[in-house]
Amino acid sequence: QKEVEQDPGPLSVPEGAIVSLNCTYSNSAFQYFMWYRQYSRKGPELLMYTYSSGNKEDGRFTAQVDKSSKYISLFIRDSQPSDSATYLCAMSAGGAGSYQLTFGKGTKLSVIP
Amino acid sequence: DSGVTQTPKHLITATGQRVTLRCSPRSGDLSVYWYQQSLDQGLQFLIQYYNGEERAKGNILERFSAQQFPDLHSELNLSSLELGDSALYFCASSPGDSEAFFGQGTRLTVV
């Protein structure tokens, strides 16, 4: 079993739809959770950063972490064609001064005008 | 723009050769991480440096090495290159926690 599982999609939605992206993980030591957006052949861009369980909202984006279920989600409201990209979840246990990230393989999202 | 600069953007080289990838972190960030992204493996952690010292190692091959200099820029050296080393190599910097900011990557093609 991989440490982080993420459905690769592709996911295609109409403009204005609510998008739900998810990851599950197996390592209970993970306590830092991130979502990155990656456009084709570009560097990952940090969207959301959450420590431990709970919700975090930033504009049209909401990140949720449920550590008891080892499940994290990213919701995108009022999706736009410019949101079309690959979304990567990432996690870290931290500790000993190292916060190396373990990534999901990414979900490719297309928002159709 | 994340503030992390990587050079070169593209690199084409032959098998058996050696290349050096360079990364300048965001101003003030002491941690530098290197990641490899391939189509089949996704983003994989290679190695981390913190203020000039190696802090953590991931799935980094013995043919690969890295260092961080006093001005905090970092270099990733890849030697005895094989076709399978073709990938995107990313550098990320962090102020000291998990909030990592990625550069635009170096696309390495080994022919």
Image: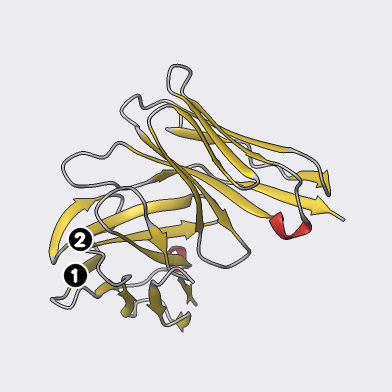
Query: How many other residues sit within 10 Å of disc 1, few (<14), some (14-19) or many (≥20)?
Result: some
Horizontal side of residue A106 vs B97, given as left or right:
right
Q: Which residue is mark 2?
A: B49
Horizontal side of residue B8 vs B27, given as left or right:
right
Above or below: residue B23 compared with residue B62: below
- What x and y, as percent, mark residue A40? 63, 64
Identify the amino acid type marked 1.
Gln
Q: Quadrant of residue B14?
A: bottom left
Identify the amino acid type marked 2.
Tyr
Q: Quadrant of residue A68?
A: top left
Residues at discs 2 and 1 in contact (Cβ within 8 Å): yes
User: Which chain is indicated by disc 1?
Assistant: B
- What x and y, as percent, mark residue A16? 82, 46
Numbered tag placed on residue B67 in the rendering: 1
The mark total stands at 2
Inter-mark Cα distance, 2 to 1: 7 Å
Horizontal side of residue B79 vs A39, given as left or right:
left
Q: Earlier in the sequence, mark 2 or mark 1?
A: 2
Closer to the eye: label 2 or 1: 2
Numbered tag placed on residue B92 in the rendering: none
